[in-house]
Amino acid sequence: MDIDKNARYAASHEWARKEGSDFVTGISDHAQHSLGDIVFVELPAVGKTIKKGEAFGVVESVKAASDLYMPVSGTITAVNDALSGDPALVNREPYAGGWMIKYTAANPSEFDVMLSPEAYEAEAGKE
Amino acid sequence: MNTTRLHQWHVDAGARMAPFAGYDMPITYPLGAVEEHLVTRRSVGLFDIDHMGQFEIKGSGADAFVSRMVSAKIDDMKDWDARYSLLLNDRGTVIDDLFIYRLPGAWWIVVNASNRAEDLAWFNAHKPSDVSVDDRSDETYMIAVQGPRAIELLDMVSDRSISDFPRFTSGNASVLGVSCLVGRTGYTGEDGVELFFPADDAEKLWTGLLAEGERRGIETKAIGLAARDSLRFEAGMPLHGHEISQDIYPLESGFKWACDFEKDFVGKAALEQLAADGVKRKLVGIEVQGGVPREGYEVQSPEGAKIGVVVAGMFCPTVKKFAANALVDPAFGKSGLDVKIVIRGKPADAKTIKRPLYVPAYRR
């Protein structure tokens, strides 16, 4: 499994990365691999405020639909519109072109307590 | 859990395995379900379908027995012809769907793995003394080779010209040195064959066909059950347990064409009564925006009234649409109507469409 060393991770397989004053989130390489071919991604409206642990969207693979959980409370500033035309970007580039949302964090300390790349790799490797 | 003789090959190839009809089967390979679907549409896909069952029916009364047991007209079939049929119960609902091959001196009947035991019991319960019904599933292996270049590949590695077999016929041929019954049939909407041969030769033929495809520059890939499902769905073919089942009449899901009302068959009286009374629901294709429609999702009228339920739905890779088959109120059983499908609790805009989404290559 590929790990982005610059991101931190949730046990539910989302990653978060600081980019300037905002945060960016998508799903891990381990998650996209487990889901299989992704055919649809539903993302929130820009401006929406979502708490940590609440669903911010849905990813649908060939076999199933899965909720996506906010790793850090925040207000959506951008979503990746490219995923509506090419949802498989999440499979091909989970940490780059397959990003899902950008947001301003309400409480940035929530980021600091997320799993480190090493801790997530160890956790995901057990599955 | 049963396994096929190619089980270790699938595992070694990195396939995601899952139980299907009592067998641990490859669902997708690392190539992915969408790409596996597209490879089959553009070149050649290889399918391990050994979970499918095969019965051999013989004896002096076999012609009359098979004709009475199955819904389709078969008395005009010549040796080597192959035809689709339904196996109905007395209520007129569908125990299974079948492919029937007329071989010299025997009927060769291909059944779904999940219904094999029930089918066999049903045939045996009706069988007269001058007919034998033998389950040949264990000693027979079954592989499908499907796609626009499948026949080209088969011709190169067989001792007979498979391209001379018309669609829906069969014949004996040696393929890579393995004696096969070759049916020009399939479940993908593409041209191709289904091969029946001794189970001991499974790996030889499977790996041989993959190697020959590569050597001759014909892209040939192993395809899992996920892509098999999307291929059949796009091409308008039913999957038992979804579009047809013991809870669904063939007249509801558009299979009147597979029932020969000129002859006597099990289930005929019930279907004639149903035809006189009128069906209460109809199978319709639906295209939807805003997510993947899946089995069990509710279908609604534009006003939000429940009009039916999705029996199968998915992303269709060739036509790039999200589509469902649903059993709905007959008033909505035609194309071009606005409806809604409730996807994850939200009614999504949808429209009834013509089936199939993908017209099979051999019907164009």
Image (tube, coloured by chain):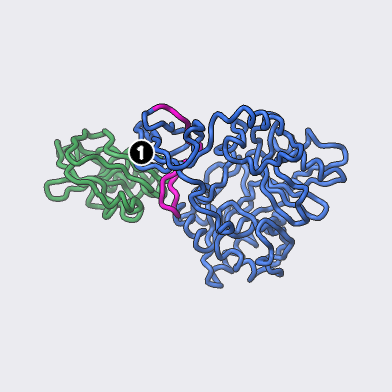
Chain colours: A green, B blue
Residue B362 placement (x, y as % from top left): 59, 58
Give the structural element (helix, strand or loop) at label 1. strand
Q: Taking the image as drawn, is residue B266 in sight?
A: yes
User: For the point 45% across and 55% down, which residue is it?
Assistant: B318
**Magenta residue span:** B305-325
In reply to whether residue B320 is colored magenta, the answer given is yes
Q: Residues within 10 Å of mark 1 (few under 14, many from 20)?
A: some
**Quadrant containing the C terminus of chain A in the rendered view:** top left
In reply to whether residue B131 is colored magenta, the answer given is no
Residue A80 placement (x, y as % from top left): 24, 49
- Chain letter for mark 1, please: B
Q: Which residue is mark 1?
A: B349
- State the residue lying farthest toward the bottom: B216
User: B185 or A60, which is in the foreground?
Assistant: B185
Question: In the picture provided, is B336 more to the left or to the right than B249?
Answer: left
Question: In the picture provided, is B322 more to the left or to the right than A55?
Answer: right
Which kind of residue does numbered mark 1 sit on?
A: Asp
Question: In the picture provided, is B181 more to the left or to the right than B10?
Answer: right
